[in-house]
Image (spheres, helix red, strand yellow):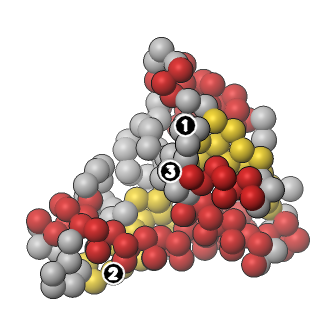
Amino acid sequence: MKNIVILISGSGSNMAAIVRRAQQEDWPRRLDAQVAAVISNKADARGLQLAREQGIVTAVVDHKAFPSREAFDAALQHEIDCHDPALVVLAGFMRILTAGFVQHYADRLINIHPSLLPAFAGLHTHQRALEAGCKFAGATVHQVTAELDHGPILAQAVVPVLPGDTPGTLATRVLTQEHRIYPQAVADFLRHAH
């Protein structure tokens, strides 16, 4: 069975979309894959409760409990590796990961970013897209490399920027597409994983 470990920091809406798709499409039977665990760096992340309600193993590795980024990443890596992951999915995980951590999961670590990469890497993507006068925004699923918000693109979705959009209205429209393309990209990855 190919194990998926999902990392979250907040509401876990992308994690929930992946879990829903796994159930609807019977990934254990059809893809020999399952969401094995959901791990957060915040004990109060709403997504943890949601995962527990689905009977998924959860864990918290609190970044504040560690003296350095390296120490946190080592503890996080230990927790993830308990589940022998075929794929590690960043779903609103708000920590910059060290190069060593990224290297350890090379070719099996993916992220979703709320812009059409390579445009607007980093934070405040919707605000920046509006300020730049973009006619389109969107979301990108990509493999994670040591460089932030770079790495091979696996999937993208485009949404129009509408007159009167605020960062909030644009974010909501983009998130709807994230919930569509992220589960699909995970399924596609698992189909091709050995």
* Image quarter hosting the N terminus: bottom right
Q: Secondary structure at mark 3?
A: loop
Circle 3 packing at 10 Å, graded few (<14), some (14-19), many (20+), is some
Quadrant position of residue 184: bottom right
Q: Are marks 3 and 2 in contact (CB under 8 Å)?
A: no
The CA distance from mark 3 to mark 1 is: 9 Å
* Image quarter hosting the C terminus: bottom right
Q: Secondary structure at mark 2?
A: strand
Q: Is residue 137 left or right of residue 177?
A: left
User: Which disc, if any, is residue 41?
Assistant: 1
Q: Image height check: is 125 above or below 147?
A: below
Which residue corresponds to the image point at 75% horizontal and 58% vertical from the top-left? 53
Of badges 2 and 1, the one in the foreground is 1
Residue named by callout 2: 159
Name the residue type under label 3.
Gly
Residue named by callout 3: 10
Which residue corresponds to the image point at 11% horizontal and 73% vertical from the top-left? 133
Name the residue type under label 2.
Val
Q: Nearer the viewer, residue 144 or 90?
A: 90
Q: Are marks 3 and 1 in contact (CB under 8 Å)?
A: no
Q: Nearer the viewer, residue 165 or 184?
A: 165
